[in-house]
Image (cartoon, rainbow, N blue to C red):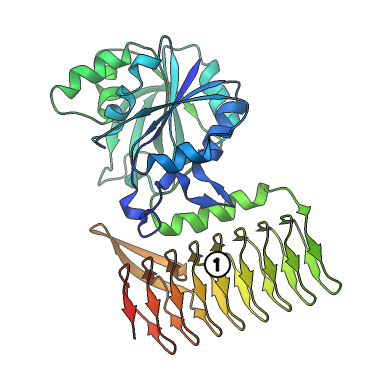
Amino acid sequence: MKAVILAAGEGKRLRPFTETLPKVMLLVANKPILEYVVDSVKKSGISEIIIVVGYKKEVIMEYFKNYKGVKITYVEQDKQLGTAHALLQSKKQIKESFIVLSGDNIIDQKSISNLIKDNSKYSILIKENPQPSKYGVVIIEKNKLKEIVEKPKEEIGKFISTGIYKLPKTIFEQIEGLASDGVYDLSSVIQSIVDQGEIIDTIIANEWMDIVYPWDLIKVNESLINSAPSSKGGVIEKGVTIKGDVSIGKDTTIYSGCYIVGPVVIGEGCEIGPNACIFPSTTIGDNSVINPFSEIRNSVIMNDTHIGSNSSIKNSIIAKGTIIDNNFSSISGSNTLEIEGEYKKLKNIGAMIGEDCTIGSNVVVDPGVIIGRKCKIEPMNRLSKKVGSSSKVM
């Protein structure tokens, strides 16, 4: 059996972090989202994977060129018309039943194995969700799929579609038929199959996490980091206090006086401290520097970043290559954010800063403020609203 992973989308709601990367390549616990999906598929026993690429495809292909243990074939979706249209691009590669997954959803190996083992011609993984109205809610009757209702306004059920299916090769005929009517989403294709009387088994997924908005990276990082193995690479000087599960990459130096409470993942080639405090659910990417007397809590710090002394960062995302001077503060609190025409009320949210920014000393960022990539923020500023990419704040 083969697996098809849909990874062609841009992820507009995740900007500025997807301005130079496809969303599936955003790092969570120092690994691309897509790698978690590929790893789970491989562990389930599938040895051939077709990845549907599109937006910034070169980033994906370059990263996985030396990936071991599974054969990866790429097909391209030139225009991102929908999930069914993306799947259709893999038609020539499929000769029998297969599974299809999204490259931007975290899924565990056991759930995939249960899907593969199911005897039904069609199967779907579903998951209970506290906010089902954000997704396609599934109506179930005796463990069989009866209906998928996209983003219902009323509460009609607690289980949602994960978008992960086991399907027969004949699905492509259904997709082509609906595409001629301008229907390109996989949920509609599946609903048409149900309407034709086909039986679709529902299987409850164990672990499934969706990444749609920037703050989802913090939430998913917090979850995944709990399963990260503890390892101590590099140099840890005397006088360092480490509690809980902490992973430290090779060629990293943790200087004297640092206090680190896991779960924490620190990449390779980093310099931490002296006297820096790293608290739970924090990831620090490769080749990053955290200067003395800085404090980081529940945050995603990506590769090649530089955090100045006496800084405080909470519930935040700092993207690749950003340089922050001394006495920086991201205030964590509540805010309402507008993303692609949607308004979201958030709690306990800090700053979300794009890649390659330069931020001067004594800058304060209010809760939920998004700063685009390649921005220059002069010293002594307080930022209370969104800053677009390539902006300069005097």
Give coordinates of residue 49: x percent, y percent: 49, 24
Residue placed furthest toward the right: 238
For image coordinates 43% across by 12% down, the residue present is 97
Q: Quadrant of residue 73?
A: top left
Quick one: SS at disc 1?
loop
Please give the name of the residue rendered at 14% of the width and 28% of the height, measured from the top-left corner.
182
Q: Residue furthest left?
A: 181
Where residue 266 appears, x then y in whole percent?
Answer: 67, 59
Depicted 303 relative to depicted 358: above or below: above
Q: Nearer the viewer, residue 117 or 239?
A: 239
Quarter where residue 375 is shown: bottom left
Which amino acid is tagged 1?
A: Thr
From where the camera sits, is residue 242 visible? yes
Looking at the image, residue 267 lies above or below residue 7: below
In this view, the residue farthest toward the bottom is 380
Q: Is residue 153 above or below residue 215?
A: above
Residue corresponding to mark 1: 305
Residue 128 visible in rendering: no
Q: For this rendering, which residue is in front, 269 or 337?
A: 269
Q: Is residue 150 left or right of residue 300?
A: left
Q: Nearer the viewer, residue 73 or 86?
A: 73
**Residue 88 on image: x %, y %:** 30, 22
Total marks in image? 1
Q: Quadrant of the C terminus?
A: bottom left
Which of the 4 image quarters holds residue 195? Answer: top left
User: On the rendered structure, is 166 left or right of 344?
Assistant: right
Q: Is residue 2 above or below residue 361?
A: above
Give the residue at x 51% y 73%. 323
Label 1 Cα neighbours within 10 Å, binned few <14 / some 14-19 / many ≥20: many
